[in-house]
Amino acid sequence: MTDETPVLELRNITKRFPGVLANDSVDFDLRKGEVHALLGENGAGKSTLMNILYGLYSPDEGQVLLNGKPADISSPHAAIAAGIGMVHQHFMLIPVMTVAENIVLASEPKKGVLLDTAGAERRVRELAERFKFHIDPRAKIEDITVGQQQRVEILKALYRDADILILDEPTAVLTPQEAVELFEILKELVAQGMSVIFISHKLNEVLDIADRITVLRRGKKVDTIPREGATEAGLARMMVGRDVLLRVDKKASQPAETLLHVDNVHVHDDRGLEAVRGVSFDVRAGEIVAIAGVDGNGQTELIDALTGLRKPSEGTIEVGGRDMTHASAHAFLQEGLGHIPEDRHRRGLVLDMSLAENLVLHDYAKPPYAKRGFINPKKIVASARGLLQEFDVRGGSAQTPASALSGGNQQKVVIAREVHRDPRVLIAAQPTRGLDVGAIEFVHRRLVEQRDAGKAVLLVSLELEEVLSLADRILVIYEGAIAGEYGPDVTEEELGIAMTGGRSREGVA
């Protein structure tokens, strides 16, 4: 049961950036021993508000109160001293150091002038046991899973005596199983008196974990409501300002000729180990085939091979009947393959370049953007303006650098570029990672439109709900091999068993 007195209040917080009112007189409060979710679309102002609380930004107007008293939080150091910890969406850990070394960094226990390694490990182990975290203090960060890395970030905050914990999109990088484990951890933290701010755009998670929910839309607070009585449809309406279709509305597929043919493909990872082991499947014109699996089961290496970024050691890959097994990534693009990559920063965008430049990355040397070897910047900018409007990209113009956009809007730019090229085969890897409910609806509709236009769509996703909603056929990948093929009527439970190597009936397409 939560205490009604707020441990934290944000009053009338306003923050402006050039051309953007990120927070517009926002009020927010947090009670002791509660999970208060902050929900909103990409670019709604959630992260800006929390960055103000954590001392990364200063508000233009408004004030922060801790336990009823005004607080001056001018830096992360001041936030930590005030008992506020933050786990960012992109973790801030040093891969070559151990769990214990990362947790005690800048607050190391000493023996004389030397680091007390044994003491650090002991304190971290005690902390982990107290909060029921299963983690080895001596393991190196580079050798543990993403879910365990997140626990290290939470332990870093607990080690510094945080009693308010901010989690920014904490499940964006987690598998469904890891997300369930995280929620158990949060329940344990709250039971021991911590207060948690949970930033998210995932409606089902918010309804699972939160005591209260505050919704932001375009920088303004819409409302704060208790979880009791809240529904996904009602929250989506508050977030987006209109009714949102939460399930994909699509007619039955009409598959035609095979456009992507994969036969006995083997692929090695960066360490030289076999990550994909004899995978075979076809994707036909007019269907969406989904590959479902827990992260790290060969999906990344398979996508790399299917897009020319990594050469298979064995097997055949054909696009539109043409053998492309050893072709370059450029040749795959020219053959009519579109690729929405799983990592938009590393593979999808050149962050320092403008949105207009990113939108023509594949085709800048072709008409209408170039003539007789000369590039026409006006044509590039004009095309970009149309695409930014069509794909509802917010937060910038054609000349804005890609780095200035929120993650969700960056993803829309990648999707706009790949769909606009009108590919015969579209490979969509985690296409809605980091997107809010309105943007997810938009992307799903676009993928179904591609299918209905006679394209072959290969969807690779960690989101079971997305797979079940979009796919006409589902392939489960486990330890680099196809563990089963299922129709769209398969249950989440059955897919979950197959994804973790369990045996169940093998479905039929």
Image: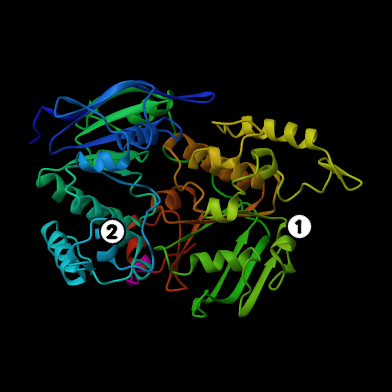
**Disc 2 designates what residue?**
105
| Magenta stretch, residue numbers | 499-505
Task: Tell me which residue sits at (31%, 41%) in the image.
Answer: 76
Residue 326 place in picture, x, y as percent:
70, 73
From the viewer's side, name the closer residue of 85 and 46.
Answer: 85
Classify residue 238 by image quadrant. top left
Q: Is residue 500 magenta?
A: yes
Residue 147 place in picture, x, y as percent:
31, 59
Residue 110 place in picture, x, y as percent:
19, 64
Task: Tell me which residue sits at (10%, 34%) in the image.
Answer: 2
Q: Is residue 482 magenta?
A: no
- Quadrant of the snapshot with the N terminus: top left
From the viewer's side, name the closer residue of 322 and 138.
Answer: 138
User: Principal SS element in the magenta part?
Assistant: loop
- The residue tagged with tag 2: helix, strand or loop? loop
From the viewer's side, name the closer residue of 222 and 457.
Answer: 222
**Disc 1 designates what residue?**
334
Q: Residue furthest front?
A: 113
